[in-house]
Image: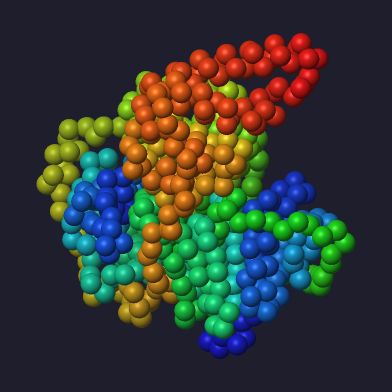
């Protein structure tokens, strides 16, 4: 394998209902930095049906080149069809790095493609860097259950691949009118060659918990002691109009559903205010919430790592502090409203 | 008669594990080894399908000799046969080398009895990647279906299965040909307490144990550390951030300070009008 043949940084562009996924825009931002450091092109790879309009967005967010596979067979994401397109493109244009969002689609596709190439794939990366000289990708992620960070390298194979967590990289500000090279490709692939069929797509009518969209999150951890103790989190969240988050321990103990889990194996969140109550702050939790606007930690243990990762900390018993907080908050809100009404 | 293979892993219980602060490595002595919790759901689903359609469930794992205990746990859940591949030459495998070795084991199992369906857990709690399942499917050239949270039908006669794949805002209904591979979500089922006869059977059960030499047409270069494109170059504790300001005083004073900080972000609390 001659590494000289492999050039450029690629981002697999996810999209849905005519919109580029925000994780792909974030990866274009991260990929731009890697490409600039190496002095190579940044490309987006776009697979789907009737998706040419999206190329504009991909250029505006930093890509120099967009490879497009726009065919009816790509109407729905399917591992086998998308994999064939990506393998075709990789074979023709030989990138040195391919980044995917660590979403269910991104992980599914990357795992299949890496096996066929074959090459190394690092999962759920939270930090990316590249060696300017060698082009070696330094992909770092929390490891061993999230107590420590590990940097993973793929020295002997190209391209190097990584899936990257949503909301940890920053998208660039889009430059209106920025454009680049559009490369349109097709592959000959018949429907009968694909062994899976999408029979139906069902949207859940029940409103699912989307804690990644909340402005305020009240998250609780094992420090609350029990399912009953955890109800305090729900009370505070309800009082201040926040969503409920949880640490991994709490979810595994069955106190709350996995949709509420914040962290490496849960959701990455960036609310304006994040309360971490009874959460010790393992790295795998921290990577999921560290970019929140205002982080408030309440914990009995003054040495808990969460206090290193917050803006304001209270050392104390949640069962003493939180009820006062709820009471005071209710009072403050009613007072504010009265004041507002008077002024209005 | 369906033949379902569940792929499993024995893992250290990462909830309990302690790190050695000097070497930045896991102190494995501090953590008990358990069946990867996600894999228990894979085995449970295989057992449910066996009960519904008839057939047998085999479990396969790669790991050190004590991994027989994880296989015994699967027998408790209701699996019929267990296969452990264990050999120093497997050591240090990343996801690519792991999927290669496990595929070789499945190929050997298939020789005796063709496999209709392979079920994996979503991921392991120590590796957290979810990459091995799809890797096995690609190597066997069967369709990989990840994020499966319901198996609607398995029709062996007509050679298809219908499943639900979880999406961010719902699910999709997929028809796939058999054989195929599912990576299943935890929500697919609940693993009940094992019935006593299963526990007795598990206590007495001796799994099949294979070394590299027992497998066929193995390319040694693709195994273990040698066959792994990814390497861990360093393990590090992230630099400690500056840390926050502690709010001092008695609880009531602490809360008052906290409230004044929080209420600075007035716009979040629907108070804009009239200010």
Residue A41 in the image, given as x and y percentages of width and height: 71, 75
Q: Is residue B11 left or right of residue B128?
A: left
In this picture, is B252 found above or below B117? Answer: above
In depth, the one of B62 and B268 nearer the eye is B268
Q: Is residue A235 above or below residue A287?
A: above
Image quadrant in which you'd find residue A109: bottom right
Please give the name of the residue rendered at 47% of the width and 74% of the height, measured from the top-left corner.
A154
Which residue is outermost to the front? B249
Q: Is residue A88 left or right of residue A149?
A: right
Residue A253, image x and y in percent?
35, 33
Q: Is residue A80 left or right of residue A284?
A: right
- Residue A61 left/right relative to B127: right
Q: Is residue A219 in sight in this rendering? A: yes
Q: Is residue B13 above or below residue B109?
A: above
The image quadrant that residue B26 belongs to is bottom left
Q: Position of residue A104 (x, y in %)?
A: 56, 50
Q: Quadrant of the C terminus of chain A?
A: top right
Measured from the top left, where is residue A133 in percent x and y? 57, 83
- Residue in view at x 46 percent, y 27 percent: B254
A182 up-or-down from B66: above or below = below
Q: In the image shown, does B89 or A301 lie closer to the viewer?
A: A301
Q: Nearer the viewer, residue B262 or A101?
A: B262
Q: Nearer the viewer, residue B14 or B123?
A: B14
Q: Residue at x 76, y 22 (%)?
A: B275
Rendered image quadrant of residue B52: top left
């Amino acid at each position: 394998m001659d590494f000289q043949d492999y050039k450029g940084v690629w981002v697999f562009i996810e999209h849905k209902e005519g919109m580029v996924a925000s994780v792909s825009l974030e990866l274009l931002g991260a990929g731009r930095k890697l490409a600039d450091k190496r002095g190579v092109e940044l490309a987006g790879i776009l697979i789907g049906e009737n998706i040419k309009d999206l190329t504009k967005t991909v250029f505006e967010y930093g890509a120099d080149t967009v490879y497009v596979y726009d065919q009816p067979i790509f109407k729905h994401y399917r591992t086998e069809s998308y994999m064939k397109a990506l393998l075709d493109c990789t074979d023709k244009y030989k990138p040195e790095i391919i980044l995917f969002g660590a979403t269910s689609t991104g992980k599914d596709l990357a795992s299949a493609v890496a096996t066929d190439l074959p090459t190394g794939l690092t999962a759920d990366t939270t930090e990316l860097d590249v060696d300017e000289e060698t082009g070696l990708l330094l992909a770092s992620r929390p490891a061993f259950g999230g107590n420590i960070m590990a940097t993973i390298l793929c020295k002997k194979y190209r391209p190097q691949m990584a899936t990257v967590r949503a909301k940890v990289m920053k998208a660039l500000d889009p430059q209106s009118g920025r454009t680049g090279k559009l490369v349109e490709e097709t592959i000959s692939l018949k429907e009968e060659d694909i062994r899976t069929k999408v029979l139906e797509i069902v949207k859940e009518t029940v409103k699912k918990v989307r804690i990644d969209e909340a402005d305020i999150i009240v998250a609780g951890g094992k420090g609350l002691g029990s399912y009953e103790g955890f109800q305090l989190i729900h009370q505070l969240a309800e009082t201040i109009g926040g969503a409920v988050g949880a640490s991994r321990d709490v979810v595994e103990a069955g106190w709350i559903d996995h949709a509420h889990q914040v962290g490496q194996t849960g959701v990455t969140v960036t609310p304006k205010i994040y309360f971490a109550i009874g959460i010790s702050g393992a790295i795998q939790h921290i990577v999921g919430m560290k970019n929140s606007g205002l982080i408030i930690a309440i914990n009995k243990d003054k040495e808990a790592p969460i206090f290193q990762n917050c803006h304001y900390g209270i050392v104390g018993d949640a069962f003493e502090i939180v009820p006062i907080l709820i009471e005071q908050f209710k009072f403050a809100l009613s007072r504010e409203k009265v004041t507002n009404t008077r002024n209005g | 008669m369906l033949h379902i293979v569940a792929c499993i892993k024995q893992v250290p219980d990462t909830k309990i594990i302690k790190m050695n602060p000097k070497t930045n490595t896991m102190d494995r002595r501090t953590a008990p080894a358990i069946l990867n919790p996600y894999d228990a759901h894979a085995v449970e689903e295989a057992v449910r399908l066996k009960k519904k359609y008839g057939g047998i469930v085999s479990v396969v794992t790669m790991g050190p000799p004590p991994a027989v205990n994880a296989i015994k746990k699967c027998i408790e859940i209701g699996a019929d046969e267990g296969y452990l591949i264990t050999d120093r030459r497997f050591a240090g495998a990343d996801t690519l080398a792991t999927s290669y070795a496990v595929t070789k084991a499945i190929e050997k199992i298939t020789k005796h009895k063709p496999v209709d369906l392979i079920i994996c857990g979503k991921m392991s709690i120590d590796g957290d990647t979810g990459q091995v399942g799809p890797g096995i499917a690609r190597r066997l050239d069967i369709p990989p279906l990840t994020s499966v949270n319901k198996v609607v039908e398995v029709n062996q006669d007509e050679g298809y299965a219908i499943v639900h794949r979880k999406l961010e805002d719902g699910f999709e209904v997929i028809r796939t040909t058999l054989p195929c591979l599912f990576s299943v979500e935890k929500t697919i089922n609940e693993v009940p307490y094992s019935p006593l006869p299963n526990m007795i059977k598990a206590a007495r059960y001796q799994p099949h144990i294979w070394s590299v030499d027992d497998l066929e047409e193995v390319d040694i270069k693709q195994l273990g550390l040698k066959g792994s494109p990814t390497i861990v170059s360093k393990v590090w504790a992230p630099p400690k951030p500056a840390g926050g300001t502690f709010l001092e005083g008695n609880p009531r004073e602490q809360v008052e300070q906290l409230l004044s900080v929080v209420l600075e972000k007035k716009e979040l609390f629907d108070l804009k009008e009239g200010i």
